[in-house]
Image (cartoon, rainbow, N blue to C red):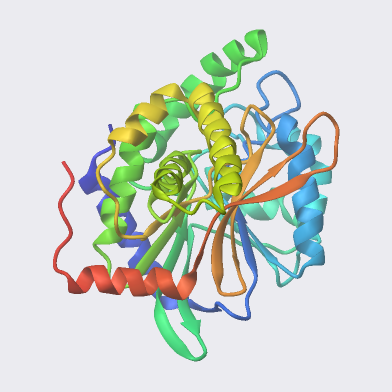
Amino acid sequence: MPSPSAIARALDGVLAELAATERPLDIERDRLVIFSDHHKGQRDGADDFAICEPAYLAALDSYLADGFALIVLGDAEELWENRVEPVLEAYANVLAAERRFQPDRYTRVWGNHDDEWEAPRRVDKHLPALLGPIRVVEGLRFAVTSKGERLGTLLMVHGHQGTLLSDRLAGVSKLVVRFLWRTVQRLTRKGSTTPATDACLRAEHDRTLYAWAGDQPSFVLIAGHTHRPVFSSKTHLQQIREEQRALQRMEDVAADLRRQARLAELRELEAKIQQQDEACASISEDDVDRSRPCYFNTGCCSFADSDITGIELVDGEIRLVKWETKHGGPARRAVLARAAVRSVYEALNDSADQGPRPTES
């Protein structure tokens, strides 16, 4: 398990370092979409992104046309398993699709699996020919405003900072992944990035990120890394079960048919998540209460069922979205959860006024 204190120290350092480059985010005017954890490979049996490529390209087309800025929040390339050149060559088309957001609507953050981009000389050697002039950063810090009023602070990082295997022992982990796990993947075509992988570790890391974010005043954290979508500090599974319970308590007879249809849809979603991720489902059910909406997670762009998830900030809202392509049909976007950004910060301030939040074991 990662050390909560080490993670907190690392995130404290990033937050402080980014204070000098804090940028404004106007929730009524700005339009952002955040994706992470593509893990683009070489289009072989160890490549987790290939099946998700159609959904991602369709999403980029839509967001480009709608005036969004694109933030790639780390682990865009799988460089623990692969050398840089074959990956960039294999996905030159995807990088070209991202380049269309340049020069003013494209930002890259480096993660642990693409920490090659932490070094500016490596960025300058490989990326400008494909993406144009670019600087890859460790994180982004925003002053969130609405109608001229500052609501609070937003931090975007990949989320691996301070963890033992992904940060402090990253060099050893790279050797294991490149020379052992990659061979297993190529022989079995078994993906490494389904939500069930390392479910206990992922749930613990979510709790640690939530606890750290909850200690900051008027503060929201958006991360990736775990491949586990989280909205308003709760996993998608938790939100589905909460909505089911609320619908079951309703007594509006006139709306009963609509309620039953929605319940059936939610049960289908719940079954799908449990089938994909039984271990994570049991952990989610037992998670401590997360009443402060301080932590959000993009999920990933490398799910084994070809779906991708991301986060939108647009029209005063924050939204967890999914893009899917099924049976060769057109890509479809679905909003999995949404909330007004102002209400998120108001809830954070309200919970702070009620005294210290319960500590997590």
For the point 35% across and 68% down, the residue is 219
Can I make out residue 243 in this image? yes
Instruction: State the residue in front, 133 or 164.
Output: 164
Judged from this view, the residue extending furthest toward the front is 253
Q: Position of residue 157 (x, y in %)?
A: 46, 56
Count of residue discs: 0
Residue 291, quarter of picture: bottom left
Q: Position of residue 87 (x, y in %)?
A: 72, 35
Give the side of residue 250 with respect to residue 184, left or right. left
For the point 16% across and 41% down, the residue is 361
Location of residue 213 with respect to 359 vertically, above or below: below
Instruction: State the residue in front, 226 or 17.
Output: 226
Q: Position of residue 343 (x, y in %)?
A: 42, 72
Residue 44, quarter of picture: top right
Instruction: State the residue in front, 243 or 141.
Output: 243
For the point 42% across and 84% down, the residue is 150
Q: Position of residue 251 (x, y in %)?
A: 43, 51
